[in-house]
Image (tube, rainbow, N blue to C red):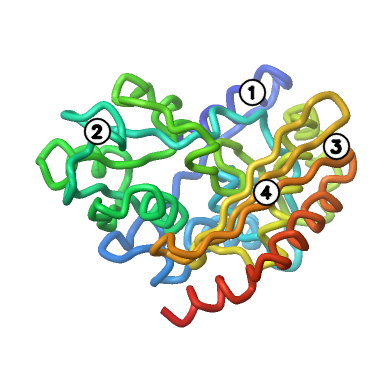
Amino acid sequence: MWQAETVRARLLELYPHSTVEILGMTTRGDQILDRTLSKVGGKGLFVKELEVAMEEGRADLAVHSLKDVPMELPEGFTLAAVLEREDPRDAFVSNDFDSLEALPPGAIIGTSSLRRQALIAARFPQLQIHPLRGNLDTRLAKLDRGEYAAIILAAAGLKRLGMAERIRAFIDPAQSLPAPGQGAMAIEVRSGRDELMQLLAPLNHADTENAVRAERQLSRSFGGSCQIPLAAYATVDQHALTLTAMVATPDGKRIARAVAQGAADSPEAVGVQVAQALEAQDATAILAACRTD
């Protein structure tokens, strides 16, 4: 809802004489909280109901966290704009400890992400990693009740909802590589809505768009979803784009990493290049092991 309100405010700034209404909806991803996303259908659970509303003409556009948008959109839909990225880092949240390094052996850490699980397990095999679902308030309440010694969340969500003070430490991307699209918001519309696309175009942030196109291409190369531990993070410096990526087994015992640089206006080519470098490190076999676990 914060994301929808933000886009609504931006559109009213651009077009002050227009009317922008929010159609609040609850998705399956919001409703199923007792199982990890990897076991109940993946990221598409957060967008399907919104796409149905657009198909039925009840909504003109949908605002998503880009990391929740499947790598392949259904036929008839397209992304009209990618907004400037917020902080892409993971955040360490705890009431008693300052960092992952400070957690004692056997401490329980909560995360809903196989990516985070793999990265934590690789660096801190002495920790217990337990699933954590629910909205931000629910996750923080579980921490406050003492169910977890610490939890890992996206920094962007905490900042957007005015909860940055709960962040005990930011985890450097070199230690916890973000998910594809993490920290970015995207606007989805029906294909062929050219006039609407033109209205939304000023909201698009070119550097962020190029970065996430590279990340999503990398993820697409491996059938990316929340069912596999995959990370990809791109940065743009003037005309150069650098993409770093990783695939791993959930226990963190097998990891492949790769990095490549290319032209910012050819992000998919950089994504393919990094995918090929991961393939050379047996990434397909690593991910196949994930799917059979």
Compare residues 183 and 49 and report the one nearer the observer.
183
Position of residue 114 in the picture relative to residue 234 (left or right): left
Check disc 3 and give the amino acid type. Answer: Ala
Q: Earlier in the sequence, mark 2 or mark 4?
A: 2
Asked which secondary structure carries label 4, the reply is strand
Residue 36 in the image: x percent, y percent?
35, 63
Per the image, the residue denoted by label 4 is 188
Q: Position of residue 112 (x, y in %)?
A: 36, 54
Placement of 9 over or under 200, stated as above or below: above
Marks 2,3: beta carbons within 8 A: no
At label 1, counting other C-alpha atoms closer than 10 Å, the crowd grade (few under 14, some 14-19, many 20 or more) is: some
**Quick check: 283 above or below 261?**
below
Q: Secondary structure at mark 2?
A: helix
Label count reads 4
Query: Where 200 falls versus 181 (above or below)?
Result: above
**Local secondary structure at mark 3:** loop
The tag earlier along the polypeptide, 1 or 3, is 1
Query: How far apart are labels 1 and 3 at the CA level?
Result: 26 Å
Task: Name the mark on residue 264.
Answer: 3
| Amino acid bearing label 4 | Glu
